[in-house]
């Protein structure tokens, strides 16, 4: 009995020595993998919506036309006098548009007004003391729009229908007296490109280039005073403009 009690005491002593060591070591470490960082927040800009704005810049007008009413033209058997004129100046106006974004593609339509008032006058080569003048005013554009966006940057092309007021006048140079004139609203086409930057969610800055071509065809001149009757002009003209744009977008 004494031997059995001594053996039990030894076992208890050994167990007591090992338990504190196990507790001191703590629980076994768990296997840990690489730390996965959350993806950064992606800032996306939506170009979808209705927008209105204004633009201003410079424009160059080039007009090629013929006139069959100068004395030199009549003496040459009706061969019209050819006139080639150009002018440059200020252009401004406004626009309204609607566009939709699908991923990186933006498609839309826009109506724009270009305030322009450019006139060109040259002396006739076939008639002394005669001035030949052409002018273009008030250009309207209705275009489709196709572009690509990189977040808040949009590059686009545009094209469509154009219309403007075109006038031709002949006058006596020394007195300024009107000889013949014609005024009409002419149709044509336009194409252009632009680049826009969304400064804030609803405020967009941009630049744009437009090429406009108006074809008047043959037009009868209306005589005034001592001006000749039965005269005509045949013309085509083009306008190139570069403008800065400010837009305000709604929706998206």
Image: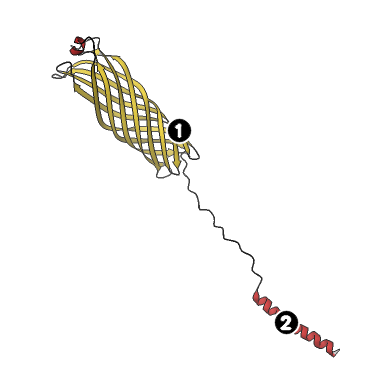
Quadrant for residue 214, please give it.
top left
Question: Which quadrant is home to the N terminus?
Answer: bottom right
Local SS, label 2:
helix
Q: Decide which of 90, 146 is in the foreground and name it.
A: 146
Question: Dot 1, how many residues are within 10 Å of its Cα: few (below 14), some (14-19), or many (20+)?
Answer: some
Residue behind mark 1: 108
Does label 2 or label 1 sit earlier along the sequence? 2
Q: In the image, is 111 to the left or to the right of 87? A: right
User: Most extreme residue toward the bottom, as rendered?
Assistant: 2
Q: In the image, is 230 to the left or to the right of 106? A: left
Model colouring: secondary structure
* Residue 96 spot, x, y in % from top left: 40, 32
Residue behind mark 2: 16
* Residue 186 spot, x, y in % from top left: 33, 20
* Residue 6 spot, x, y in % from top left: 80, 88
Q: Are marks 2 and 1 in contact (CB under 8 Å)?
A: no
Residue appearing at x 31%, y 28% in the figure: 239
Local SS, label 1:
strand
Q: In the image, is 96 to the left or to the right of 225? A: right
Quadrant for residue 170, please give it.
top left
Q: Is residue 214 above or below residue 95?
A: above
Q: Decide which of 212, 99 is in the foreground and name it.
A: 212
């Amino acid at each position: 009995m004494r031997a059995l009690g001594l053996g039990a005491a030894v076992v208890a002593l050994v167990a007591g020595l090992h338990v504190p060591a196990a507790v001191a070591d703590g629980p076994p470490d768990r296997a840990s993998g690489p730390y996965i960082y959350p993806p950064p927040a992606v800032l996306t800009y939506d170009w979808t919506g209705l927008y209105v704005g204004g633009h201003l810049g410079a424009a160059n007008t080039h007009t090629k036309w013929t006139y069959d009413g100068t004395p030199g033209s009549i003496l040459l058997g009706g061969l019209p006098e050819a006139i080639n004129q150009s002018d440059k100046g200020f252009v401004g106006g406004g626009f309204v548009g609607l566009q939709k974004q699908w991923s990186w593609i933006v498609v839309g339509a826009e109506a724009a007004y270009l305030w322009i008032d450019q006139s060109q006058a040259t002396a006739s080569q076939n008639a002394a003391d005669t001035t030949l003048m052409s002018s273009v005013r008030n250009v309207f554009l209705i275009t489709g729009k196709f572009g690509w966006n990189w977040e808040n940057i949009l590059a686009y092309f545009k094209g469509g229908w154009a219309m403007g007021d075109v006038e031709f006048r002949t006058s006596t140079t020394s007195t300024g007296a009107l000889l013949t004139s014609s005024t009409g609203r002419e149709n044509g086409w336009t194409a252009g490109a632009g680049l826009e930057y969304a400064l804030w969610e609803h405020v967009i800055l941009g630049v744009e280039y437009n090429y406009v071509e108006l074809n008047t065809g043959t037009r009868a001149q209306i005589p005034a005073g001592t001006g000749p009757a039965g005269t005509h002009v045949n013309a085509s003209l083009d306008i190139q403009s570069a403008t800065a744009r400010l837009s305000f977008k709604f929706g998206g």
